[in-house]
Amino acid sequence: MSIIVPTCFENPLKEESIKFTEDVLAQKKRAVLPVTALMGAYHIATRYLKIPRVAVKKVLEGIAESGSAALYPQVTPENAADGLDYACAYGIESWDGYLIAIAKGSGTSIIYSLDVELAKAGEVTVVVPFSPEAVSKYHDFLRAKGF
């Protein structure tokens, strides 16, 4: 989720986030994008970052309507249960547990995220798909805005 949020508003990470998302959707980058991540990104962008709802909706709707095979629509009870197991075992958010469950179910241990805390689960490798400089500027930007 955290890698999609920067696509929704002006910030130092926006261009890199757009490029990465485009590469995933075009399948230039081998990854899946859970459709549920769009809902989570909307929640974070509008509720916490106070980005205008219509602007966020347009960006996320464009991703949802892309027709990309990278969009992962399966939210099964098994994925949810496995995600809860990971969340409970590692003391992480249930959403993060769900990401681990679908990564492992997809045969990978790599998760693209800005949330390096996710790596504490030990079962996955977290890869930040953006330059360290841009990530640092993004975090500084969010701090300056009071987030």
Image (tube, rainbow, N blue to C red):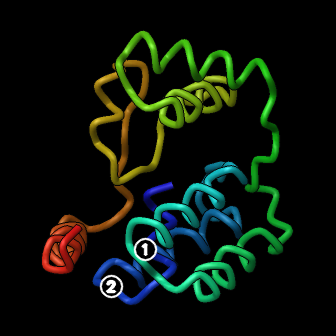
Check disc 1 and give the amino acid type.
Pro
x and y percentages locating residue 82 in the rendered image: 63, 16
- Whether pointer 1 and pointer 2 mark residues with C-beta atoms closer than 8 Å, the reply is yes
Q: Is residue 41 above or below residue 11?
A: above
Quadrant of residue 143 within the rendered picture: bottom left
Q: Residue at x 51, y 29 (%)?
A: 94
x and y percentages locating residue 138 in the rendered image: 24, 74
Q: Residue at x 74, y 80 (%)?
A: 62
Dot placed on the residue nearer the N-terminal end, 1 or 2: 1
Task: Give the position of the C terminus as an image quadrant.
Answer: bottom left
> For residue 6, which numbered disc appears in the image?
1
State left or right for residue 35 relative to residue 8.
right
Badge 2 density bin: few <14, some 14–19, many ≥20, Cα 10 Å = some
> For residue 11, which numbered disc appears in the image?
2
Badge 1 density bin: few <14, some 14–19, many ≥20, Cα 10 Å = many
State left or right for residue 113 relative to residue 29.
left
x and y percentages locating residue 25 in the rendered image: 69, 67
Check disc 2 and give the amino acid type.
Asn
Quadrant of residue 67 within the rendered picture: bottom right
SS for callout 2: loop
Q: Is residue 94 above or below residue 145?
A: above
Q: Is residue 103 above or below residue 89?
A: below
SS for callout 1: helix
Give the spatial CA distance, label 1 vs label 2: 7 Å
